[in-house]
Image (cartoon, rainbow, N blue to C red):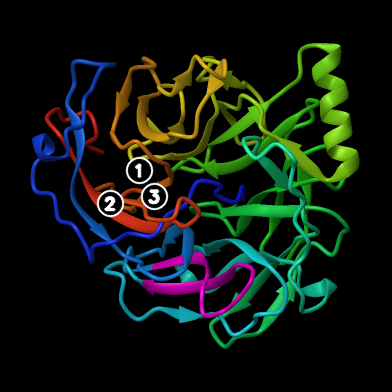
Amino acid sequence: MINILFKSVIIFIWVVISGCNQIKIKNNYSNKSFCLTHTKQLTFTGDNGEAYFSTNDERLVFQSRRDGNQCDKIYTMSAEGENIQMLPYTKGAFTCSYFSINDQYIFFSSTMQDGPECPEVYKDPDSRKYIWPLRNFDIYRISKDNKIKNLTLSNGYDAEATVHPVENKIIFTSLRNGDIDLYEMDYDGGDLKRITKEFGYDGGAFYSPNGEKIVWRGWHPDTEEERMQWIKNMNNNYIESVPLDIFIANRDGSNRKRLTNNGATNWSPSWHPSGKYIVFSSNMDNWLEEHNSYGPNFELYLMEIETGELHRLTSNNTFDSFPVFSKNGRKLVYSSNRNADNPRQTNIFISELHYTTNLLSY
């Protein structure tokens, strides 16, 4: 998945917040009350991100650059931040890890097939411009006995894999046909199906709790200039920052609906277990007049799908992203560079979701 640009190291051990008013979260979008409480920092070393729960909510799998490694590896830890362990395969770069149903496997993407070195990363001369390199990732699965299998075996970007809640299916993002699109396959890499076909970017998909729908981030060029920009990006295996939006559709990609349309970068969406809400990250409230563009301050938002009502969950002058709910919907894990000394390091946090309505009951 997209590597985090705005990152930090946290200077205190952990913070517990017991009330909504103490974290000064303002809700300017709806008269319903939602906020994050009892926030706890889970990682303190290295550069960490994209944490996802195990089936029983007791463990997390995440990517981290630490222990002297120059690119990300995959780690697991308890949901309390304890017993951090690295997966035994370490050659190349790693990203996008996820537990299978019943935690039989962990899926992840890696460049290990290309050798032990970390792949080169393109850097734009404009330091303000965010460039996302499309590395030659393949999707792998590792079993509990550490047996590994490459599921994609194709040149180009294959990553961002998440799993169906009931069936042994994976949805993922791939460049295999010359454009970034969503695909579905079995746990063994078979029965490959293409889900999206529109020209442009479609990625970072999650199945709904009942497995009947998907949510993802996307951008589709409207003008000839945008089309040429996208073709250049695909030919050079990187993506420039574009105004991403959130979409939902049936599992097969039909009946697509656009949930955001604000010109900002809206991304990393996932579902609340009720199926009534999605949570995502956006810089919609960080318009910078001096640059005539949106800035690097990404906050977390909760959206009611049926009504489109929006609830802002965080209020930090920093980067908050990759939010994912626990299976019972009571906790939210996410990545943040809050309280940073160094804007290029990120840590993982976990909070409880507090609300004053019963709309999240299920």
Sequence-wise, the earlier of marks 3 and 1 is 1
- Residue 31 is situated, as x and y percent measured from the top left of the image, at 18, 15
The reply, left or right, for residue 76 in relation to residue 199 is: left
Between the C-alphas of marks 3 and 2, the distance is 22 Å
**Residue stretch rendered in magenta on the structure:** 60-77
Q: Label 2 is placed on what type of residue?
A: Asn
Which quadrant of the figure contains the C terminus?
A: top left
Residue located at (60% from left, 51% from top):
3
Q: To which residue does mark 1 refer?
A: 273
Above or below residue 62? Residue 134 is above
Between the C-alphas of marks 2 and 1, the distance is 7 Å
Residue 178 visible, this angle? no
Q: Please rate how many residues cluster around mark 2, counting C-alpha atoms within 10 Å: few if below 14, some from 14 to 19, many from 20.
A: few
Question: Looking at this rendering, what residue extends furthest in the bottom direction?
Answer: 145
Q: To which residue does mark 2 refer?
A: 328
Q: Please rate how many residues cluster around mark 1, counting C-alpha atoms within 10 Å: few if below 14, some from 14 to 19, many from 20.
A: many
**Are the residues flagged by discs 2 and 1 in contact, CB closer than 8 Å?**
yes
Question: Looking at this rendering, what residue extends furthest in the top direction?
Answer: 223
Q: Give the structural element (helix, strand or loop) at label 3.
A: strand
Q: Which mark is residue 336?
A: 3
The reply, left or right, for residue 111 in relation to residue 95 is: right
Q: Give the structural element (helix, strand or loop) at label 2.
A: loop
Above or below residue 80? Residue 200 is above
Q: Give the structural element (helix, strand or loop) at label 1.
A: loop
**1 in the magenta segment:** no
Residue located at (44% from left, 59% from top):
51
**Are the residues flagged by discs 3 and 2 in contact, CB closer than 8 Å?**
no
Q: Label 1 is placed on what type of residue?
A: Pro
